Amino acid sequence: MGALKFEGRTVEYQWATDVSFDGIRLEVLSNEGDVLFDVSIPDDGHITVNTFGKEVSASLIAAAVEIARRPR
């Protein structure tokens, strides 16, 4: 698990894999520990964001995408 600083607060995230997805996901967690949204990084293709129909701050999404683009 990791944490990112965002607008004066800390938001936790975790890396996850899925057997039906060729790549890795960065899951950003809510304060309750649920997945708020995820950033999918495929082995071959474009990074995508799934907010599961929730409204999420564009600044938080941008911060998560920045982490997802870093080498692992």
Image (tube, helix red, strand yellow):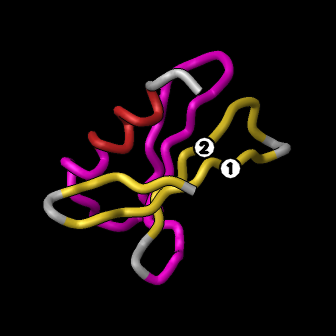
At 36% across and 67% down in the image, what residue appears? 54
Decide: few, some or many residues near mark 2? Use Cα within 10 Å; few <14, some 14-19, many ≥20. many
At 52% across and 76% down in the image, what residue appears? 33
The disc labelled 2 sits on which kind of residue? Arg
Task: From the top left corner, tell me how far across and down residue 26 is, in percent.
Answer: 54, 46
At 75% across and 30% down in the image, what residue appears? 22
> Residue 62 falls in which quadrant of the image?
top left
Q: Earlier in the sequence, mark 2 or mark 1?
A: 1
Task: From the top left corner, tell me how far across and down residue 18 is, in percent.
Answer: 77, 47
Q: Is residue 53 left or right of residue 15?
A: left
Residue at the disc numbered 2: 25
Task: From the top left corner, tell me how far across and down residue 70 is, in percent.
Answer: 46, 25
Q: Which residues are magenta?
A: 32-61
Q: Toward the viewer: 47 or 66?
A: 66
Q: Is residue 17 left or right of residue 11?
A: right
> Residue 21 falls in which quadrant of the image?
top right
The disc labelled 1 sits on which kind of residue? Ala
Disc 2 vs disc 1: Cβ atoms closer than 8 Å? yes
* Label drawn at residue 33: none
Q: Label 2's element? A: strand
- Residue 5 in magenta stretch: no
At 62% across and 48% down in the image, what residue appears? 15
Q: Is residue 22 above or below residue 15?
A: above
Instruction: Specify the quadrant that holds the C terminus.
Output: top right
Residue at the disc numbered 1: 16
Q: CA distance from mark 2 to mark 1?
A: 5 Å
Instruction: Specify the quadrant that holds the N terminus.
Output: bottom right
